[in-house]
Image (cartoon, rainbow, N blue to C red):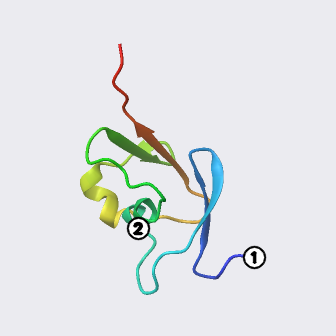
Amino acid sequence: MTSPLSLTLSLNGESCTFTPVAGSPPSLAALLGSLASPLPARGVAVAVNGALVPRQHWPHHPLNAGDVVEIVKALQGG
């Protein structure tokens, strides 16, 4: 069972329950900050419901129950 303040969404294809800090709106930046591994400063793209969200919009991009969030990290290779 989830708390009334929790959101169930899809994160990289898996169901995820996210509970923002009390008093804070559920934003993309809050979700990304709650991940076990911090994201690198460069080479990361995030899409919500198929639309790319520029990094400068992460703090203000709202999340809703059922959203589909995809995180893509660039890898160097040859």
Residue 76 rendering spot, x and y as whole percentages:
33, 24
Asked if labels 1 and 2 touch by Cβ distance under 8 angstroms, the answer is no
Q: Residue furthest top?
A: 78
Residue 62 rendering spot, x and y as whole percentages:
42, 65
Between 21 and 4, the one lying in front of the other is: 21
Q: Residue furthest bottom?
A: 23
Q: Around disc 1, counting alpha carbons within 10 Å, would you say few (fewer than 14), some (14 to 19), or many (20 or more)?
A: few
**Picture quarter with the C terminus:** top left
Q: Around disc 2, counting alpha carbons within 10 Å, would you say few (fewer than 14), some (14 to 19), or many (20 or more)?
A: many
**Picture quarter with the N terminus:** bottom right
Q: Upstream in the sequence, badge 2 or badge 1?
A: 1
Residue 57 location, quadrant: bottom left
Residue 51 location, quadrant: top left
Residue under the point 44% across and 45% down = 47
Residue under the point 43% across and 38% down = 72
Residue under the point 45% across and 80% down = 21
**77 above or below 18?**
above
User: For residue 1, which numbered disc appears in the image?
Assistant: 1
Three-letter amino acid code at the position of disc 2: Ala
- Residue that badge 2 annotates: 30
In the structure shown, which secondary structural element does the residue marked by tag 2 occupy?
helix
Asked whether, in this view, residue 48 is left or right of residue 15, the answer is left
Three-letter amino acid code at the position of disc 1: Met
CA distance for labels 2 and 1: 21 Å
